[in-house]
Amino acid sequence: MPAETEAKIILGDCGLLERVEVKLRGLGAVFLEEKREEDTYYQHPCRDFAETDEALRIRRHGERPPELTYKGPKRVVGGAKTRQEETVTLSDGEAMHRILLALGFRPVATVVKTRRYYRLGDVLVTLDKVEGLGCFLEAEYQGSGRPEEAIQAIEGALARLGVEKLPRTTLSYLELLLHKQR
């Protein structure tokens, strides 16, 4: 069962994105790509994903095929979170949307963000500008080590970037957006 382990840093000032990017380059991080992602999240017809801490989304991103992703409940370890994540590539995102609606799922919200992806060793660092929320840095472990090694790699990357003391959140962008709308 694939798992995702990541830490999310709240950047109070979007100007920090540029400074972190300079540090990434100085550390030899590899720039991978920049893309706009549009994530539409769905509510299950029979159980409340907010209560079960699950998520189901369709992601549309540029010219790539859309993806359907399920995320299981979070487990927080230190300042990072780990959760089951299953993703399938779709040939037709609109057809999947119609199928979900026919099954009783309903769209909850759409999160739109521009992301710049960097690889720093075993850590994928994304610099995010999220519409309606501001700027964030996510550090996700991409290696094959145990959870303890994942946390150590993430914390090491954050320290090297000088952002380890900035505020963190284990909330998803969807949760942050819904809290802001309330």
Image: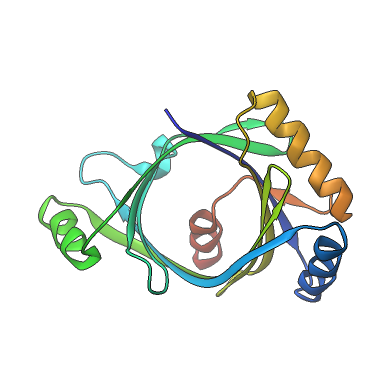
Q: Residue furthest left?
A: 102
Which quadrant of the figure has residue 22? bottom right
- Residue at the spot 55% in from the left edge and 75% down from the top edge: 131
Pick the residue in front: 103 or 1.
Answer: 1
- Residue at the spot 18% in from the left edge and 54% down from the top edge: 100
In the rendered image of this protein, does residue 24 appear above or below residue 131? above
In the rendered image of this protein, does residue 160 appear above or below residue 111? above
Count of number-bearing discs: 0
For the N terminus, the image quarter is: top left
Which quadrant of the figure has residue 19? bottom right
Where in the figure is residue 86, as x and y percent of width and height? Answer: 38, 40
Pick the residue in front: 31 or 161.
Answer: 31
Where in the figure is residue 63, as x and y percent of width and height? Answer: 38, 73
Q: Is residue 35 visible?
A: yes
Which quadrant of the figure has residue 51? top left
Q: Coloring scheme of the render?
A: rainbow
Q: Tell me: 172 left or right of 159.
A: left
Where in the figure is residue 78, as x and y percent of width and height? Answer: 73, 32
Q: Is residue 165 visible?
A: no
Pick the residue in front: 145 or 47.
Answer: 145
Where in the figure is residue 98, as x and y percent of width and height? Answer: 15, 62
Q: Tell me: 61 left or right of 146.
A: left
- Residue at the spot 15% in from the left edge and 51% down from the top edge: 104
In the rendered image of this protein, does residue 176 appear above or below residue 13? above
